[in-house]
């Protein structure tokens, strides 16, 4: 896998995730010191998926987040471009589909909400994906993205980048079925923009009311936005 950058080859990224699929959830928990569970719980609260709603969980991997979001009674669909990840999550009992975030196989206005958890930084074109996501969300629907971010407090940011991230990567390599993939994942974390920059990218794709919530000192942030209602375009 080449070094992480913003011109990622989607076929290589998919192959990488196919390679780590078998032990991905375990390695992810080890790498994040168990915080991934807490981040999913908070993301589920922000998403607030309700009975009768249709939710697309994009870059869902094995569907662990999809199962979490479905607990409130909404119909939640796991979508990912790694078939290996989807196969590894078949036991979760949630509907799954193989999908490319830049060419989603859904009609316009199909979902009440779309969520992406720790996966949007792997998309080859973030803004294009946000535009495509907006296409399949109904007017007034919502976007919720949980992704790595930049701790705003300088000392914590220094410790995170210089020490903690390396330690997380080391733990991930030891607990993964494909250790080399975790070098890419660490580099992709460092290359990802900070909270405000990502919020501006979301807004540039036509989303409104963009806001974010820092988790774990800003190591991760949840961004939320709304697709403009039809009457706002009148």
Image (spheres, helix red, strand yellow):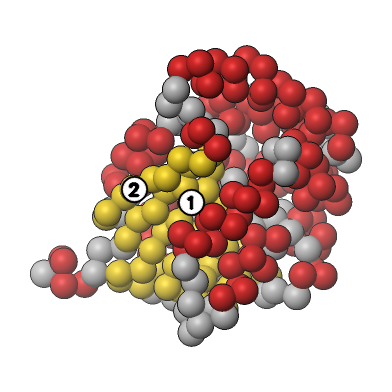
Q: Residue 195, position in %: x, y? A: 40, 36
CB atoms at circles 2 and 1 under 8 Å apart?
no
- Tell me the quarter of the picture where residue 33 sits: top right
Q: Residue at x 81, y 30 (%)?
A: 171
Q: Residue 180, position in %: x, y? A: 80, 29
Q: Residue 162, position in %: x, y? A: 62, 15
In this rendering, does residue 170 appear at all?
yes
Camera-nearest residue between 48 and 7: 48
Q: Tell me: residue 53, above or below residue 82.
A: below
Q: Tell me: residue 13, above or below residue 62.
A: above
In this rendering, does residue 103 appear at all?
no
Please state if 102 lies on the left or on the right of 187 as rendered. Answer: left
The secondary structure type at the circle numbered 2 is strand
Q: Most extreme residue toward the bottom, as rendered?
A: 52
What distance separates the C-alpha of mark 2 from that of mark 1? 11 Å
Categorize mark 1 by other alpha carbons within 10 Å: few (<14), some (14-19), many (20+).
many
Q: Quadrant of the C terminus?
A: bottom left
Q: Residue at x 79, y 34 (%)?
A: 172
Please state if 74 lies on the left or on the right of 107 as rendered. Answer: right
The secondary structure type at the circle numbered 1 is strand
Categorize mark 2 by other alpha carbons within 10 Å: few (<14), some (14-19), many (20+).
some
Q: Residue at x 36, y 72 (%)?
A: 138
Per the image, the residue denoted by label 1 is 145
Per the image, the residue denoted by label 2 is 211
- Closer to the chain start, of discs 2 and 1, is 1
Q: Tell me: residue 31, above or below residue 232.
A: above
So how many labels did they put on this image? 2
Q: Most extreme residue toward the left, as rendered?
A: 234
Q: Residue 68, position in %: x, y? A: 64, 65
């Amino acid at each position: 896998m080449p070094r992480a950058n913003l011109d990622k080859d989607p076929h290589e990224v998919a192959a990488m995730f196919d390679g780590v699929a078998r032990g991905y959830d375990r390695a992810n928990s080890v790498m994040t010191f168990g915080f991934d569970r807490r981040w999913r719980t908070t993301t589920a609260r922000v998403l607030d998926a309700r009975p009768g709603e249709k939710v697309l969980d994009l870059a869902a991997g094995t569907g662990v987040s999809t199962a979490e979001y479905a607990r409130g009674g909404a119909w939640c669909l796991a979508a990912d471009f790694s078939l290996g990840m989807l196969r590894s999550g078949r036991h979760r009992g949630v509907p799954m589909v193989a999908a490319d975030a830049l060419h989603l196989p859904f009609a316009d206005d199909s979902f009440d909400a779309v969520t992406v958890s720790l996966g949007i930084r792997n998309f080859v074109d973030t803004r294009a994906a946000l535009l495509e996501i907006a296409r399949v969300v109904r007017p007034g629907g919502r976007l919720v993205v949980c992704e790595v971010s930049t701790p705003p407090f300088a000392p914590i940011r220094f410790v995170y980048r210089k020490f903690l991230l390396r330690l997380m990567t080391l733990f991930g390599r030891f607990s993964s079925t494909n250790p080399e993939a975790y070098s890419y994942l660490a580099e992709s974390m460092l290359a990802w923009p900070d909270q405000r920059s990502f919020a501006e990218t979301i807004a540039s794709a036509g989303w409104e009311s963009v806001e974010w919530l820092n988790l774990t000192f800003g190591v991760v942030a949840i961004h939320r936005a709304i697709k403009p209602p039809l009457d706002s375009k009148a």
